[in-house]
């Protein structure tokens, strides 16, 4: 019923939000006669704020068109490599028509970034992806909004999450020989489980694991998020935050933890911070500080865009990670796609480097929660493990913003490179042929990323 009321409210506010948007543009346009009154700028700012508070936020784009590799600008084209019911494996294909740059791109490590499935879209890691693309071939898990997944696609469990990660790792291993995996926040737990299971079976495991700000052991320095999950019973969550998707969506009837409830929880954690941020935005509009106002819009376009999570996955995560601590107690069993049940044993991992990253001021995953992975992965030699605490960084600061780019990324880049085997050489004739094709294609306007056309490129480009 709550979901239906929310949708009714959203439908009611939509025309008012649209009107506020138009009014803000009219009153804020210097050439408009209505903008000549003394208070027009303040009224326009008020309407603009009302529009943003009432609008519906859709999934943003990654919007990464180009990056600089050295002194060369490289074009980026997004494409889906594997499309699963609840997740797409998205690749950021890099194009260059300079043979030296192309060779450099082809020799760089392959990294699978496992994005959180905890409310926001994978685009929350836009800055992470953009920075990693300088020195890596980058793939990311792009989780889907559960309300857009028909019931015919079945349920989605925490076990399925683990199985998806293993499938994606194997895909990259087949394509490139091996890969590195990087998990941010929530996926540190299922990623560690996925790699553990592969190691226990004797499969090839990723060359390195980078785990950033995740609840490997949520008992350590528990935060407000941890405390809520620990103090409420499983039944409380099932009875109070799980609803069925209403009519009008492909996932009609699916049990989910709705995105709007998650968003309310995000805001409730720091209400004063968000209130002050919106007031600052109002003042920026009045002053004409367009650069700061645009930064505010970009942040909240991302922050306010949320997705529904399948109920089974969400509830199992609460129980496994925050209530029964199955990973650290060694009692976690995962069911594979063939129905086989296997115990998660991180101590079986031996041939994978481990880097853990924590923010000094992280209020989502407390101090020591991610570092706990080292206590579990006892099979990895101490020389192949490293922990890095980011001074002055909160949760988002370890994967986005200045501290991520200047402090964290160099550590991550160097750790991955240290675990990347030397290449056996690349066929320069193939590189030159690929570069010539790209150059001619670009000149013919046949293969630019904007138009989305491409042919199969040389490995690693």
Image (spheres, grey):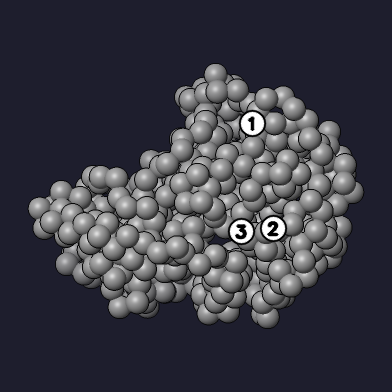
Give the residue pinned by disc 3. Answer: 207
Mark 1 vs mark 2: which is more N-terminal? 1
Assign a secondary structure to mark 2.
loop
User: Within 10 Å of the Cα at label 3, are there few (<14), some (14-19), or many (20+) other Cα atoms?
Assistant: many
Residue at screen point 76% across, 44% down: 200
Residue at screen point 55% across, 23% down: 153
Identify the image quadrant of the N terminus. top right
Give the residue pinned by disc 2. Answer: 351
Relative to 437, 290 lies left or right: right
User: Within 10 Å of the Cα at label 1, are there few (<14), some (14-19), or many (20+) other Cα atoms?
Assistant: some
Q: CA distance from mark 1 to mark 2?
A: 30 Å
Q: Are the two marked residues, 1 and 2, in contact with CB atoms closer than 8 angstroms?
A: no
Q: From the image, state whether disc 3 or disc 1 is nearer to you.
A: 3
Relative to 332, 163 lies left or right: left
Residue 390, horizontal then vertical, whole percent: 67, 77
Residue at screen point 67% across, 25% down: 338
Residue 447, horizontal then vertical, whole percent: 20, 50
Q: CA distance from mark 3 to mark 2?
A: 7 Å
**Tag shown at residue 156:** 1
Residue 426, horizontal then vertical, whole percent: 36, 62
Mark 3 vs mark 2: which is more N-terminal? 3
């Amino acid at each position: 019923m709550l979901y239906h009321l929310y949708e009714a409210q959203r439908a009611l506010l939509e025309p008012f939000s649209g009107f506020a948007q138009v009014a803000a543009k009219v009153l804020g346009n210097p050439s408009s006669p209505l903008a000549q009154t003394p208070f027009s700028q303040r009224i326009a700012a008020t309407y603009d704020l009302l529009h943003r508070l009432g609008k519906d936020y859709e999934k943003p784009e990654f919007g990464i068109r180009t990056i600089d590799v050295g002194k060369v600008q490289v074009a980026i084209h997004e494409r889906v490599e594997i499309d699963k019911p609840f997740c797409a494996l998205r690749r950021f294909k890099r194009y260059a028509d300079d043979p030296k740059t192309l060779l450099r791109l082809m020799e760089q490590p392959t990294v699978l970034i496992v994005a959180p499935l905890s409310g926001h879209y994978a685009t929350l890691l836009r800055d992470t992806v953009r920075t990693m693309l300088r020195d890596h071939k980058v793939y990311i898990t792009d989780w889907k909004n559960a309300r857009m997944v028909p019931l015919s696609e079945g349920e989605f469990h925490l076990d399925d999450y683990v199985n998806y990660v293993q499938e994606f790792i194997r895909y990259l291993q087949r394509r490139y020989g091996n890969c590195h995996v990087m998990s941010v926040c929530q996926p540190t737990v299922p990623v560690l489980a996925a790699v553990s299971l592969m190691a226990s079976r004797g499969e090839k495991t990723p060359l390195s694991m980078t785990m950033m700000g995740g609840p490997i052991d949520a008992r350590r320095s528990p935060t407000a998020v941890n405390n809520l999950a620990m103090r409420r019973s499983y039944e409380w969550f099932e009875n109070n935050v799980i609803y069925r998707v209403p009519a009008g969506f492909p996932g009609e009837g699916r049990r989910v933890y709705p995105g709007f409830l998650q968003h309310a929880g995000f805001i409730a954690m720091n209400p004063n911070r968000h209130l002050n941020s919106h007031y600052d935005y109002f003042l920026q509009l009045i002053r004409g500080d367009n650069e700061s106002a645009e930064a505010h819009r970009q942040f909240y376009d991302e922050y306010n865009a949320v997705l529904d999570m399948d109920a089974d996955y969400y509830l199992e995560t609460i129980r496994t990670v925050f209530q029964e601590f199955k990973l650290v107690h060694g009692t976690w069993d995962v069911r594979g796609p063939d129905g086989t049940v296997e115990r998660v044993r991180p101590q079986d991992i031996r041939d994978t480097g481990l880097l853990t990253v924590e923010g000094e001021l992280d209020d989502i995953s407390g101090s020591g929660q991610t570092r706990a992975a080292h206590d579990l992965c006892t099979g990895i030699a101490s020389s192949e493990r490293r922990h890095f605490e980011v001074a002055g960084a909160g949760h988002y600061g370890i994967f986005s913003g200045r501290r991520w780019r200047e402090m964290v990324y160099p550590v991550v880049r160097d750790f991955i490179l240290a675990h990347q085997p030397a290449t056996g050489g690349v066929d320069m004739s193939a590189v030159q042929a690929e570069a010539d094709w790209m150059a001619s294609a670009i000149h013919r306007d046949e293969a630019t990323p904007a138009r989305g056309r491409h042919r199969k490129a040389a490995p690693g480009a």
